[in-house]
Amino acid sequence: MHKCKICDSSSLKKIYDDQFDSTYYFCEVCEYIFLDQEEIVSEKDEKEVYDQHDNTFESKGYVKMFESFIEKAINPFIKEKKRALEFGCGPGPVLAKLLEMDGWVVNTYDPIYDNNEEYEKYKYDLITSTEVFEHFSNPVKEIKHLSKLLKKGGYLSIMTLLHPKTEEKFKNWWYKRDATHISFYSSKTLYLLGKMFNLEMIYNDNNRLITFKKV
C-alpha cells in the first residue's frame, strides 16, 4: 500500500496521466502530490534535462526572476545580511552571485553540479532553494537537513510552483511536463512540512514563493 511521503497517510487518490503515461498520488490529508517511485528518472537523465536549461546571466528573464525573488521573499524580512546557502544552485549559480552583490557571504551546493561537503561546516542566516523542492523524492529528509543548517531565527526562502488542487487542472498543468519534477505542494503541504521542523511560514504569495523562519 502506498503512503504519503510527508504525513504518512494512506488516504491517497491515484491520478493517472494518460498523456504522459504517468501515475501520481494525491494525499487527501496534506495535499502533497508525488510521482510513482518506479517512474522517477535516473540521475543521468535528470542531468540531461538540466543541461538544456539556460541558467546564466545572459538570460535576462532568469536573472529578473531571481531579482524578484530577493525583493519579495528575502529583503522584507532580513535586514542584517551575513551567511547564506544557495541549496540546489545548478550549473550557473546566478542567485548566489546576486546575493553576494547584495552583501551576503554565500555558500553553494548542488548534488549534480556542485557536490561538496564544505557547505555543511556552517550554520546559516538564510537558505535559498529555488526550483528545487519539486525535484525532491524525499521532502521530509531534505527539509530536515536544511532546518539543521539554519540558525535559530534564520530564514528559508523557497521557490516552487504550487499545484492546482483539482485532478483535471493537475493533468493539464504545464509544470509537471518536466520529467524531473516529481513532487508538488500546496500551501497546506508546505505549512505542515515546515511545522515538523519548527519552521514558521511567514510569507506566501500563494503562487510559488514561500519564506519560513526557524523558531
Image (cartoon, rainbow, N blue to C red):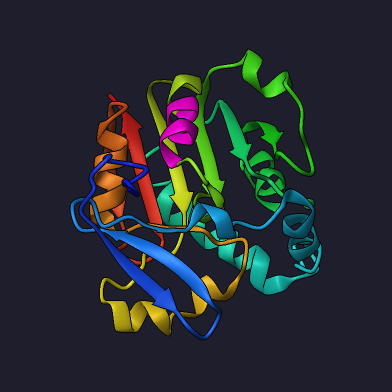
Residue 55 on image: x %, y %? 74, 62
Q: Residue at x 65, y 13 (%)?
A: 121
Q: Residue at x 76, y 43 (%)?
A: 112
Residue 92 on image: x %, y %? 78, 52
Residue 209 on image: x %, y %? 40, 57
In the displayed structure, 32 sits above or below 6; it is: below
Observer-nearest of 155 and 45: 45
Residue 132 seen in the figure: yes
Observer-nearest of 84 and 22: 22
Rendered image quadrant of residue 24: bottom left
Observer-nearest of 108 and 25: 25
Farthest top residue in view:
121
Rendered image quadrant of residue 33: bottom left
Where's the C terminus, which quadrant? top left
State yes or no: residue 63 in magenta. Answer: no
Rendered image quadrant of residue 77: top left
Relative placement, left or right, of 38 versus 207 is right
Counting labels gives 0
Observer-nearest of 137 and 74: 137
In the displayed structure, 166 sits above or below 131; it is: below
Q: Residue at x 63, y 19 (%)?
A: 120
In the displayed structure, 57 sits above or below 3; it is: below
Residue 131 seen in the figure: no
Farthest front residue in view:
1
Relative placement, left or right, of 73 versus 101 is left
Relative placement, left or right, of 114 versus 165 is right
Q: Residue at x 75, y 71 (%)?
A: 59
Q: Which residues are magenta?
A: 139-146
Magenta part, dominant SS: helix
